[in-house]
Amino acid sequence: MPNDEGITALHNAVCAGHTEIVKFLVQFGVNVNAADSDGWTPLHCAASCNNVQVCKFLVESGAAVFAMTYSDMQTAADKCEEMEEGYTQCSQFLYGVQEKMGIMNKGVIYGLWDYEAQNEDELSMKEGDCMTILRREDEDEIEWWWARLNDKEGYVPRNLLGLYPRIKPRQRSLA
């Protein structure tokens, strides 16, 4: 459970650099995109520590690379610490993912949350839906991308998308 500021065990493990605990928690099924009271996700924390190994693991586990903090509206890539060791690799990795997401893998991305369309040009999606990005930006939209899901097309909010689906809790049997 998060503390009163929304900080989870995953946030703490990331900030402390405990990579094995990070992997255990994510594989156990904790929410890789849990945001604290200022919108910091574990990916923001890993980026602020320039921990490229943990950043890669979180992205591969369904982290939302376009999630933004509430106060300064920054993505994890913006949080890489310029004056610290590892800045270049971390920054290049995260900005590279942002730049290539929706292009690499033939444009395939995944919904990280459910979203119900609010307008007729939007696309409803469920967490885990696999879709193809047809247009990342246009003259009308930057934060919304044009996608195809099955036989439908429409705008989807890019901050709800991931390069990989979120890792789900493992099924545990009582046997």
Image (spheres, rainbow, N blue to C red):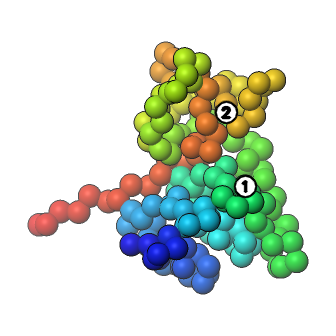
* Image quadrant where residue 80 sits: bottom right
For mark 2, give the secondary structure.
strand
Residue type, numbered disc 1: Met
* Image height of 17 relative to 168, above or below: below
Which x, y percent locates residue 144? 67, 33
Identify the image quadrant of the C terminus. bottom left
Residue under numbered circle 1: 73
Q: Residue at x 50, y 70 (%)?
A: 6
Which x, y percent locates residue 103? 71, 35
Residue type, numbered disc 2: Trp
Q: Nearer the viewer, residue 162 or 157?
A: 157
Q: Residues within 10 Å of mark 2 (few under 14, many from 20)?
A: some
From the viewer's perspective, tell me whether residue 13 is left or right of residue 24: right
Residue under numbered circle 2: 144
Q: Nearer the viewer, residue 144 or 13?
A: 144
Identify the image quadrant of the N terminus. bottom left
